[in-house]
Image (cartoon, rainbow, N blue to C red):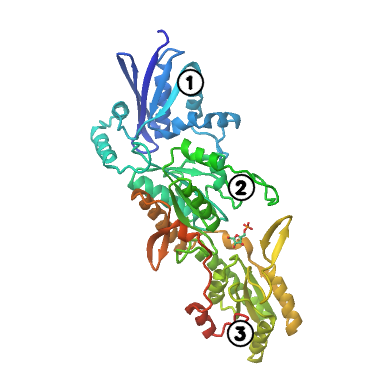
Amino acid sequence: MSAMECAIYTDGACSGNPGPGGWGAVIIAGESVKEISGSEEITTNQRMELRAAVEALRSIPPDSKVKLHSDSAYLVNCFNQGWMERWQKNGWFNSKGNPVENQDLWKQLLELTGLNRVEWIKVKGHGTEQFNQRCDLLARSAIGDGGTADCKKRLKADLNHKTVGKGDRQVCRLGVLTGGGDCPGLNAVIRAVVKGASYNYDIEVVGFNNGFKGLVENDAALIDDFAVSGILNRGGTILGTSNRDNPFDYRPNSSDYRKTGEDRSADALESLNKWEIDCLVVIGGDGSLLLAHRFSELGVPIIGIPKTIDNDLRATDITFGFDSAVTTATEAIDKIHTTAESHHRVMVVEVMGRHAGWIALQAGMAGGGDIILIPELPFEYSCIAEKIEERRRRGKKFSIIVVAEGAYPAGEEPLYQLRGEVKRLGGIGQLISREIENLTEMESRATVLGHLQRGGSPTSFDRVLATRFGVKAVELFQAGRFNEMVCLRGNKIESAPLKEAVAGTKLVDPNSEQVRTAMAVGTSFGCHL
Ligand code: F6P
């Protein structure tokens, strides 16, 4: 046979994944239409997609000019996004360091594409295109699954599917990234977005790795139901995160804030374009959501999901991650209590929270802290000493002080630790401990809880909140509501304009019922209220 110009359509199908699977291909050259198909006993859908392409290319003469149509974004992206080159360069390991699956087929495909001039074209999913529908039937017939009923059902579902975003593509794509400091519950949200999208709407999800860095550097992959199995209770984020890669002021691999960054937002937009993302879901705190807002101003449809242990985001009553951090801090305070009591000491526990006192207030109350110091109420050392003395007079020979890292004495500024040019809040606990020894003759020790508060499993509250947030984000997308952030109000999951969420920091109201309640049970805030 001599070289030719042809169009190839391919599809794979599996009953169960892994399970018996089939593949089908239609090869059209001029007036001639050839159909081929085959099956494997125990296989995966992805492997069948690959098999279909390999067998179809093998059935044409070398040097052919081929337009290869597939509904598998994975397959098409592998060539169009340069994954294959990266895998080859990395010795067939993917970006997560795992060996690439189905290497035998990828390698055959690589060789066959080298022999021909192949253009990869992504078509609408689930056999909605005439020839792909035919391939779907061929693949199903190959495993004895007549296919027709199921295929028709899916075709109908696809046609009823509400299209959102650009073009007439019917399988929509959500991009998702986790930005800023990590916190328990991130994986639960990713899982909810992927499951909510694929179970209910047949929407694909692309995960960008390491926050906005993955967007700038086009480091991403499709994440499916399997990728999110078993991560509900896992701390951290399977996507990785970063709290310093600002695409508008980009300084890769450098935390040196003296360096001038580059505006790489155009690269980020290009990545979104390459992946045909209809909407970007940004799971982040104020920094990441501010960046998301900037992208929304550049025309990117955005949905925000509020994350931070600090709970300092406006427009939501609670962010996920907060409850887990408070639980960790409370457990620590409980432990500090017993040793404080044994040694008759003043124990200072420094918690995170940046410029908001939510963690200190919540954990301080839950752990029975005698003195709670928050940035919203600058303290006086004399007041702290007075409270300790008062307790001593009443026979309480120990005291617990819970201090937010951003708390500071009246008339002064929050305390920062300097590393090069980078400033980080911290150190106030030590300072208070020393001052207490000077003022009260009591022994004192300070404990900084630090990143313990961001680690470990999410509490059940955070798992549920994260799941509700993730599913709501998908619903907002389906409804075509962009540039909003999902939020919790009372016990209802709602949404608010992104603009509102990033308009400032949510601080503790010193006159709130919660502060007054703490005072009503004798807690001091280290100042005269
Ligand atoms: O915003 C979350 C948070 O944990 C703050 O409470 C804390 O000040 C900061 O991040 C610490 O950031 P890093 O991980 O860069 O030390």
Q: Secondary structure at mark 3?
A: loop
Q: Secondary structure at mark 2?
A: loop
- The answer to whether mark 3 is within 8 Å of ligand 1 is no
Q: How many marks?
A: 3
* Near-viewer residue (350 or 376): 376
Q: Say if 189 sits above or below 217 in the image.
A: below
Residue sitting at x 56%, y 31%: 87
Could you tell me how far apart the alpha carbons at marks 1 and 2 are, in whole angstroms?
Answer: 39 Å
Q: In this view, which residue lies farthest toward the top?
A: 1
Do the numbered discs 3 and 2 sit on residues whose CB atoms are within 8 Å? no
- Measuring from the top left, give residue 138's x and y in whole percent: 30, 26
- Measuring from the top left, give residue 495's x and y in whole percent: 39, 59
- Crowding near the residue tagged with mark 3, few <14, some 14–19, many ≥20 C-alpha atoms within 10 Å: few
Could you tell me how far apart the alpha carbons at marks 3 and 2 are, in whole angstroms?
Answer: 43 Å
Residue sitting at x 47%, y 79%: 513
Going by the numbered disc 2, the residue's amino acid type is Asp
Tag 1 or tag 3, which sits nearer the N-term?
A: 1
- Crowding near the residue tagged with mark 2, few <14, some 14–19, many ≥20 C-alpha atoms within 10 Å: some
Image quadrant containing the N terminus:
top left
Residue under label 2: 249
Image quadrant containing the C terminus:
bottom right
Q: Quadrant of ligand 1?
A: bottom right
Residue under label 1: 113
Could you tell me how far apart the alpha carbons at marks 3 and 1 are, in whole angstroms?
Answer: 77 Å
Residue sitting at x 63%, y 76%: 378
- Measuring from the top left, give residue 481's x and y in whole percent: 37, 52
Numbered label attached to residue 528: 3
